[in-house]
Amino acid sequence: MYAKADANMIARLKEIVGDAHVLSDRNAMEPYSHDETLELEAWPEVVVKSASAQEVSAILSLANEKNIPVTPRGGGQGLSGGAVPIYGGIVLSLERMNHILEIDHANLMVTVEPGVVTGELQRAVEAEGFLYPPDPASQDSCFIGGNIAECAGGPSAVKYGTTKDYVCGLEVVLPTGELIQLGGKLVKDVMGYNIIQLMVGSEGTLGVVTKIILRLLPLPKAEIALLVPFDDFQKAADTVAAIIADCLIPTSIEFMERTAVQASERILSKYLIFSDSEAQLLIRLTGQRQ
């Protein structure tokens, strides 16, 4: 069984990160008791907001010594309960570690801390002529560290894949407090065990990510969006397979059937084009030429 984070433990945590960055009042901790998963909630005994890998190391080392559970937390936008502290203990928030450390033009890579908002990262690299493709639905509020923990995807996964396909290097603090470096600015990194991919999607159960190196792509110069209505449900489904079979890989391709479209009309109180069609495909294409 795990131990509780008592007053003495909370005092020691304050010594590590400062009084202002340790929360133990119930009202203050409420946002950290859940993510966006419906009807899933669990309360920590304390919330700690770290600002560096060294602070994370000290927190995990102390928690390991006292047998207190730690739940790492990014933006809390997940839908799988990954940030919910089901064993109580410490919620370790990475929200203060929110810096883009380097955009490397020569190697087409970016180095970031885990608390950077994914949408802000995308806009920053786009301003430099690059693309970071993974686009989870909550991209303007989720953190890149949470994307790593959950292996987040998005509509662009059709062409570009998911978060796991862009992680080249990680700095990770293990549950014992040990700090390790995995990978680096390497595209071909095939030696030894693939620990990076073991970390991606592990929801913080194997360690806490404190620095991330991501691969970038050249920013596409052209983009086209197509909304295609169908009078037959099966024809729409078959068209998806036909497009891929014809060696055309859309950036994204979304399937919408009539019931969902008409429900959206009612919720939005707004007419949507082709809402009487049996199904629709929303197709987005990107490339270097219009």
Image: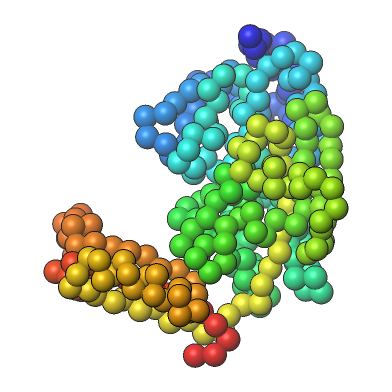
Q: Name the residue nearer the viewer: 34 or 164.
A: 164
**Name of the residue lying farthest toward the bottom:** 290
**Where's the N terminus, which quadrant?**
top right
Placement of 60 over or under 157, stated as above or below: above
The residue depicted at 45 percent of the width and 55 percent of the height is 137
Placement of 251 over or under 58, stated as above or below: below
Q: What percent of the width, then of the height, locates residue 238?
A: 32, 69
**Colouring rule applied to residues:** rainbow
Residue 216, quarter of picture? bottom right
Placement of 271 over or under 2, stated as above or below: below
The residue depicted at 65 percent of the width and 59 percent of the height is 165
Q: What percent of the width, then of the height, locates residue 289?
A: 54, 90
The residue depicted at 42 percent of the width and 28 percent of the height is 40
The answer to whether residue 86 is left or right of residue 116 is left
Kindly tell me whether residue 59 is visible in this rendering: no
Q: Name the residue nearer the viewer: 289 or 85.
A: 289
The answer to whether residue 62 is left or right of residue 5 is right
Q: What percent of the width, then of the height, locates residue 8?
A: 72, 11
Kindly tell me whether residue 86 is visible in this rendering: yes
**Name of the residue lying farthest toward the left:** 276
The answer to whether residue 221 is left or right of residue 267 is right
Q: What percent of the width, then of the height, locates residue 34?
A: 47, 31
The residue depicted at 81 percent of the width and 56 percent of the height is 190
Q: How many marks?
A: 0
Q: Name the residue nearer the viewer: 124 or 246.
A: 246
Q: Name the residue nearer the viewer: 285 or 208.
A: 285
